[in-house]
Image (spheres, rainbow, N blue to C red):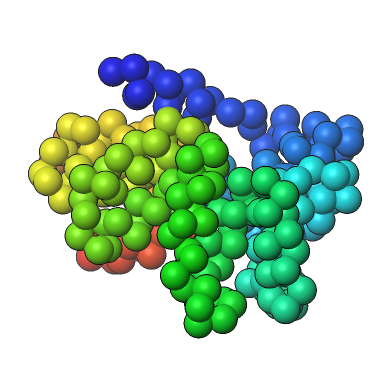
Amino acid sequence: MAPMILAILLLAAATPAELEKSCNAGKAKACDELGNLFHDGFGVQRDDVRAAELFRKACKGKDAGGCADDARARALGEGQTANARTALPRLEQMCKAGTARACGNLGDLFVRHLGGPQDATRAEPLLTQACDKGFARACSNLASIAFHTGDKDRAEELAQRSCELGDPSGCAHLGDLYLTTHDSLRAGLYYSRACEGGSPRGCAGQGYLLVDSGVDPKRGRELLQKGCDGGDVRACDALRELK
């Protein structure tokens, strides 16, 4: 029970409005956190351009996480023209300097096949290094890798860690995992936590369970719509099938 309680407390983070106020007041870390909300579509409409602006602002304010997220966005061309040639060396330098988020972002980019062929083998070690240092998104990315390679026990462990660290995506991963084992009760609990944290996938999963079980189809459709509006393709597909 303790991990779930911890996750609930951690997911009760600052609202977008509160982060906006702090960012405008000069708190660079708040700018980075708000940028990530816009990047992931957690509690706000996804907006890569706005996220990129906030990452740049956070980096100018000398927030290491903001600089790491700015470099990642530049490498992928999110909200701007892609420039992996300059972004990857920046992340390498920050990672070597001890910034966990930079190591995690670098690992994520290598998973996406940015960098040289030799870098593919570095992806998981970098993500593991970042996860071990408390970067929740790295744990979530590792959970996805473990799940797709068939190691469900490892995926559950990593998703649990990500959720405990406050990443709604990790909680949504747990919902997906428990749904595959037909543990609807635990799946629903984690989907609910993810949805409350702003995850479109969490809302979609919770909505699917409410519709499929017949417990509350009306509320289920509302949550599926919320997930679809947030960019979850599976939620949109489910809504079309219900019509």
In-front residue for pair 225/151? 151
* Residue 178, image quadrant: top left
Q: x, y percentage for residue 57?
A: 84, 50
**Quarter of the figure that contains the C terminus:** bottom left
- How many numbered discs, if any? 0
Relative horizontal placement of residue 160, taking residue 35 as reference (left or right): left
Q: Is residue 45 visible?
A: no
Q: Position of residue 111 (x, y in %)?
A: 47, 69
Residue 46 is left or right of residue 82, and the answer is: left
Picture coordinates of residue 72 (x, y %)?
66, 63
Q: Residue at x 34, y 36 (%)?
A: 160
Instruction: Judge whether 66 appears above or below 21 on screen.
Output: below
> Which residue is found at the position 45% from the left and 50% from the top?
128
Where does the image place residue 152, in percent across and percent down from the top left? 21, 50
Q: Nearer the viewer, residue 126 or 229?
A: 126
Which quadrant is the N terminus positioned in?
A: top left
In this orientation, does residue 156 appear? yes
Furthest residue in direction bottom, as rendered: 117
Q: Pick the residue in front: 231 or 241.
A: 231
Identity of the residue drawn at 87% across and 44% down: 61
Q: Is residue 100 above or below residue 76?
A: above
Q: Residue at x 74, y 37 (%)?
A: 30
Tell me if residue 43 comes above or below residue 86 in the rendering. above
